[in-house]
């Protein structure tokens, strides 16, 4: 990991545009040469991220996803910058458009919704549990495939995903209200049925899956 000085950080980020910030400061920057700098803060002192920073998890996950045939970013460097007290990763921008941007365009996009349902089923088949699943973190790539960004919070399970985990993953997707509304235009039940078909889940499980997803707390 690169121990980045204040001067190096300034050189890297001069002229950058801010893609994401929150109450604690900058989160994602777009720098020269279409490089993305994503910053991670250690949320608590007693946290696993002290010994295993999110930047390293992000890098490991992105590599493994690409190896498994799921397009994701290719991290060039990880760093820690003491001056801003942040871990970070640097990667070239993944060419493509976030699904939230495409769907918010207004037109119905049934093909894309079906593709997304199939993509989630494929992730689950590969025992990949992506906790940050939402329409801003999935991109449509120029070759028509879907790819993932923001992959720090993701696990590769040993065992097949349980029905509970699958439902929970859909709750992640539906909890952002803007995203939920976009999915509602296609139909939430219809979307989940596409997923269940693609995942090869039996008819008996289907109605249970749907009713529990609707009734259980998020
Ligand atoms: N590799 C990339 N290719 C294209 N755009 C990117 C890439 N990485 C980040 N972005 C853009 O920056 C935005 C924020 O990035 P990212 O999702 O990694 O940050 P975040 O702060 O964790 O977001 P959130 O908490 O909303 O999921 C994305 O929604 C996307 O528009
Ligand atoms: Mg994101």
Image (cartoon, grey):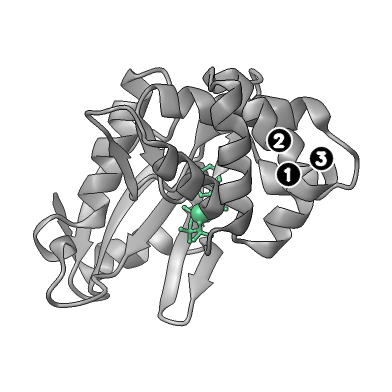
Q: Give the secondary structure at mark 3.
A: helix
Q: Is residue 135 visible?
A: no
Q: Which residue lies most toward the right here?
A: 107
| Mark 2 in CB contact with mark 1 (< 8 angstroms) | yes
- Bin the neighbour count of mark 3 within 10 Å (Cα to Cα): few under 14, some 14-19, many 20 and up: some
Q: Residue at x 64, y 18 (%)?
A: 143
| Label number found at residue 191 | 2
| Label number found at residue 186 | 3
x and y, in percent, of residue 137 in the image: 54, 46
- Bin the neighbour count of mark 2 within 10 Å (Cα to Cα): few under 14, some 14-19, many 20 and up: some
Earlier residue among tags 3 and 2: 3
x and y, in percent, of residue 146 in the image: 58, 28
> How many angstroms separate mark 3 from mark 2 (CA)?
7 Å
Q: Is residue 162 left or right of residue 190?
A: left
Q: Give the secondary structure at mark 2.
A: helix
| Mark 1 in CB contact with mark 3 (< 8 angstroms) | yes
Of 155 and 76, nearer the camera is 155
Q: Is residue 145 left or right of residue 38?
A: right
Question: Which mark lies nearer to you, 1 or 3?
Answer: 1
């Amino acid at each position: 990991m690169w121990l980045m000085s204040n001067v190096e950080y300034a050189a890297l980020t001069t002229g950058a545009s801010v893609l994401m910030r929150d109450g604690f400061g900058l989160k994602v920057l777009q720098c020269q040469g279409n490089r993305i700098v994503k910053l991670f803060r250690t949320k608590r002192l007693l946290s696993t991220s002290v010994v295993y920073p999110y930047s390293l998890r992000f890098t490991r996950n992105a590599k493994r996803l690409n190896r498994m045939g799921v397009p994701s970013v290719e991290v060039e460097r990880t760093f820690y910058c003491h001056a801003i007290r942040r871990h970070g990763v640097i990667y070239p921008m993944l060419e493509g458009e976030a699904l939230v941007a495409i769907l918010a365009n207004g037109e119905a996009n049934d093909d894309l919704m079906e593709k997304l349902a199939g993509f989630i089923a494929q992730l689950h088949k590969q025992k990949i549990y992506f906790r940050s699943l939402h329409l801003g973190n999935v991109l449509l790539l120029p070759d028509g495939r879907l790819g993932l960004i923001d992959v720090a919070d993701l696990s590769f399970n040993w065992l097949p995903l349980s029905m509970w985990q699958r439902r929970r993953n859909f709750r992640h997707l539906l909890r952002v209200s803007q995203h939920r509304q976009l999915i509602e235009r296609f139909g939430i039940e219809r979307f989940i049925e596409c997923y269940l078909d693609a995942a090869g889940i039996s008819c008996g499980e289907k109605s249970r899956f749907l009713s529990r997803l609707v009734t259980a707390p998020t």
